[in-house]
Image (tube, rainbow, N blue to C red):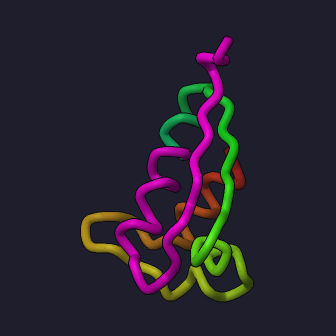
């Protein structure tokens, strides 16, 4: 049976697609703030986002910078 208090997000897009790369971190942050356990998986170009220095240059219109979202998710 699925655990209703756990979400898995697969990050597939890298820095060349900032909106697609940012949305999973927005959703993960919201879930964590609601006391839902989150698992982040990285595949394909998504692995680039967790390389040192890459997130600093990723920003999508209407969202906080990816570096801030990553820091928030790590903190939560």
| Image: magenta residue range | 1-28
Q: In this view, does 6 lie above or below 3?
A: below
Who's the residue at 68% across and 31% down the image? 37
Q: Position of residue 32 (x, y in %)?
A: 60, 36
On whether residue 8 falls in the magenta region, the answer is yes
Q: Relative to the observer, which residue lies in front, 13 or 18?
A: 13
> Which part of the image, by quadrant, shows the N terminus?
top right
Residue lying furthest top: 1
Q: Name the residue rendered at 63%, 52% in the picture.
A: 73
Q: Which residue is at a point 46% across and 68% down the rendered structure image? A: 21
Residue 57 lies in the magenta-colored region: no
Which residue is located at x 61 percent, y 86 percent?
A: 54
Image location of residue 75, percent across then percent down: 70, 51
Residue 4, image x, y percentages? 59, 17
- Please give the count of numbered marks on the rendered protein: 0
**Above/below status of 56 relative to 4:** below
The x and y percentages for residue 6 are 65, 27
Is 56 drawn above or below residue 21 in the view shown?
Answer: below
- Give the side of residue 28 with respect to residue 1, left or right: left
Q: In which quarter of the image is residue 67?
A: bottom right
């Amino acid at each position: 049976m699925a655990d209703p208090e756990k979400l898995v997000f697969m990050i597939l897009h890298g820095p060349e697609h900032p909106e697609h790369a940012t949305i999973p971190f927005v959703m993960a942050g919201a879930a964590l703030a609601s006391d839902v356990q989150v698992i982040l998986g990285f595949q394909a170009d998504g692995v680039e986002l967790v390389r040192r220095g890459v997130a600093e240059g990723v920003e999508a219109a209407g969202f906080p910078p990816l570096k801030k979202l990553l820091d928030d998710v790590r903190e939560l």
